[in-house]
Image (cartoon, rainbow, N blue to C red):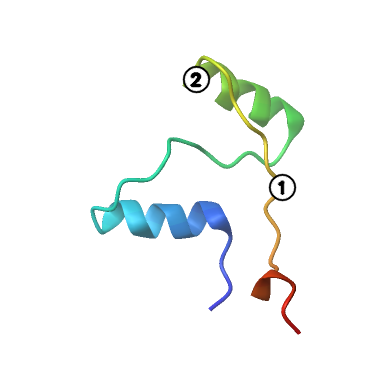
Amino acid sequence: MKIHEYQAKALLAAAGVSVPRGEPAFTADEARAVAERLGGRVVVKAQIHAGGRGKG
């Protein structure tokens, strides 16, 4: 199964697993709005379908 990290976090949260707060953003403006909603310091990460952590 290949899913984005934000999708995996939503599945884990729905199952009761504690995950860091965050939201996906698809544009720079959306990222800015998410950062303002979260408050404090934030990290912006690219979400791509990649797996295997460099193995093969």
Residue type at numbered disc 1: Ala
* Mark-to-mark CA distance, 1 and 2: 19 Å
- In terms of depth relative to the viewer, which is nearer, 28 or 54? 54
Question: From the viewer's perspective, is residue 1 above or below residue 37?
Answer: below
To which quarter of the image does residue 27 belong?
top right
| Crowd rating for badge 2 (residues with CA inside 10 Å; few <14, some 14–19, many 20+) | few
Residue 6 position, x and y percent, is: 52, 51
Q: Which residue is mark 2?
A: 37
Residue type at numbered disc 2: Arg
Residue 47 position, x and y percent, is: 67, 53
Q: Nearer the viewer, mark 1 or mark 2?
A: 1
Q: Secondary structure at mark 2?
A: helix
Q: Secondary structure at mark 1?
A: loop
Question: From the viewer's perspective, is residue 26 above or below residue 30?
Answer: below
- Give me the disc on residue 46: 1
Q: Earlier in the sequence, mark 1 or mark 2?
A: 2
- Give me the disc on residue 32: none
Q: Is residue 8 left or right of residue 12?
A: right
Residue at 58% over, 73% down: 2
Residue at 35% over, 57% down: 12
Q: Is residue 22 left or right of residue 29?
A: left
Residue 55 position, x and y percent, is: 72, 79
CB under 8 Å between callouts 1 and 2? no
Residue 33 appears anywhere in the view: yes
